[in-house]
Amino acid sequence: MNCMSNVQVKLTLLDDRLEDSELQEKTENLLQDIKQEVEVEDAGLVTVENSPEGSKSVSGYLLGVLTAKVNKTKIQSFMRLLGDRLLGKTIEIEVTANGKTLKAKASSQAELIAAIKAAQEFVGE
């Protein structure tokens, strides 16, 4: 398999009602779920060194941000997990595949479903 069969996903959880530490805890819990339930090539929190200027950070990591490298064949199960875990949450998702990037923001169930569907179609075969 070549590296083109991997999809890079960057996910940002956004919730102004949570304290920074609570948001980071939710991000870390989601990361654990991803690692346990979906076969990913790599997944982790984004370090401050890789952050855009003006980003918030907690203990050296970008607040509410995680990345995952997912094999194309596993993207549907990955997106299904996100749909289950992130229902009702506000998120930004960035999917990079085949040298192109798709960005979407969702703050409702309908938007989340649409963003996940768009990401799956974007990755396509």
Image (cartoon, rainbow, N blue to C red):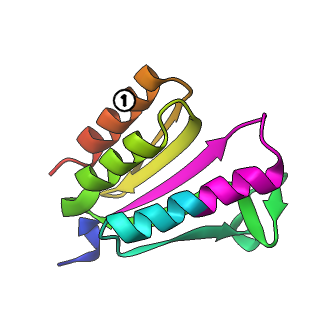
Above or below, 27 against 101 in this view is below
Give the structural element (helix, strand or loop) at label 1: helix
**Residue in the image at 39% along x and 42% along y:** 84
The image quarter in which residue 8 lies: bottom left
Left or right: where does residue 66 sit relative to residue 60? left
Question: Hey, what amino acid is under mark 1?
Answer: Ile
Confirm whether residue 97 shows in the render: yes
Dot 1 crowding, Cα within 10 Å, few <14, some 14–19, many 20+: some
Above or below, 93 against 107 in this view is below
Above or below, 44 against 14 in this view is below
Left or right: where does residue 59 sit relative to residue 37? right
**Residue in the image at 35% along x and 75% along y:** 41
Q: Quadrant of the N terminus?
A: bottom left
Q: Residue 3 at what x, y percent from top left?
A: 29, 75
Q: Residue 67 at what x, y percent from top left?
A: 52, 63
Confirm whether residue 55 shows in the render: no
The image quarter in which residue 73 lies: bottom left
The magenta stretch is 7-28
**Residue in the image at 45% along x and 45% along y:** 85
**Residue in the image at 36% along x and 50% along y:** 81
Q: Residue 43 at what x, y percent from top left?
A: 47, 71
Q: Is residue 21 magenta?
A: yes
Left or right: where does residue 106 sit relative to residue 114? right
> How many tags in the picture?
1
Q: Which residue extends farthest bottom?
A: 1
Q: State the residue position of label 1.
A: 113
> Is 55 or 112 nearer to us in this picture?
112
> Is 56 or 86 nearer to us in this picture?
86
Q: Residue 29 at what x, y percent from top left?
A: 57, 61
